[in-house]
């Protein structure tokens, strides 16, 4: 999931050099020696939901790499021209074909090494019937005791589920911020 370094200028195609830009910036960037374009690379947002039906949570078995056949919450990269909440809802429709009401933000995770921020909202399912898209082998509900903890695709999903079931026990849902390396 780590991003490859930039090799060529997005503006003119010349080979770039990684160096400090001339404007006082203190981080090395891919700088184009031909046209002077400085390429800034910043974290990407991954947005998704914790869809719940009573005591159960909806997980999707991935039909795509990475982590094919592992279980995940519905989530994916945020697109341009949408809000965080719109992206989370879109991914939930696309990956699970679920009908739901989007509730509040639940977890925010900095995935430092991958250069990503993962954001999950709670989503109240309005039906227990699902129509998953091509990225999903199977979408089904799990109670806490049945969660396949060793088969969860991503650390942020596992941590979010741990927080979710702990909050269920407390009877109160907060916003959880954490980091994974
Ligand atoms: Zn250039």
Image (cartoon, rainbow, N blue to C red):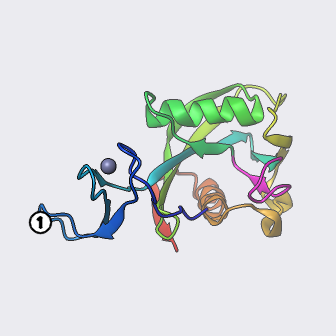
Instruction: Tell me what residue is drawn at x 48 percent, y 48 percent.
Output: 45
Instruction: Tell me what residue is drawn at x 43 percent, y 32 percent.
Output: 83
Q: Is residue 6 above or below residue 138?
A: below
Residue 168 lies left or right of residue 98; in this view the side is left
Residue placed farthest to the bottom in the image?
181
Q: Quadrant of residue 158?
A: bottom right
Instruction: Tell me what residue is drawn at x 51 percent, y 40 percent.
Output: 78
Disc 1 residue: CB within 8 Å of ligand 1: no
Residue placed farthest to the left in the image?
24
Magenta part of the chain: 63-73
Where is residue 100? Give x, y as percent: 66, 28
Which residue is identified by label 1? 24
Query: Who is closer to the viewer here, 30 or 72?
Result: 30
Where is residue 62? Give x, y as percent: 80, 49
Query: Who is closer to the viewer here, 90 or 50?
Result: 90
Quadrant of the snapshot with the N terminus: bottom right
Q: Does residue 93 show up?
A: yes
Q: Is residue 72 above or below residue 131?
A: below
**Majority secondary structure of magenta residues:** loop
Query: Who is closer to the viewer here, 160 or 68?
Result: 68
């Amino acid at each position: 999931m780590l991003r490859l370094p930039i090799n060529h200028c997005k503006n003119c195609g010349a080979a770039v050099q990684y160096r400090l830009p001339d404007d006082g910036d203190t981080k090395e960037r891919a700088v184009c020696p031909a046209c002077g374009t400085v390429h800034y690379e910043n974290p990407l947002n991954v947005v998704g939901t914790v869809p719940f039906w009573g005591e159960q949570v909806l997980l999707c078995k991935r039909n795509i790499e990475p982590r094919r056949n592992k279980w995940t919450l519905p989530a994916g990269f945020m697109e341009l021209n949408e809000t965080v909440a719109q992206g989370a809802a879109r991914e939930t429709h696309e990956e699970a074909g679920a009908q739901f009401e989007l509730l509040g933000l639940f977890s925010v995770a900095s995935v430092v090494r991958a250069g990503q921020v993962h954001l999950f909202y709670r989503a109240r399912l309005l039906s227990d019937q699902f129509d998953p898209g091509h990225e999903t082998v199977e979408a089904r509900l799990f109670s806490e005791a049945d969660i396949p903890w060793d088969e969860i695709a991503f650390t942020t999903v596992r941590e979010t589920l741990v927080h979710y079931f702990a909050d269920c026990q407390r009877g109160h849902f907060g916003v959880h911020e954490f980091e994974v390396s």
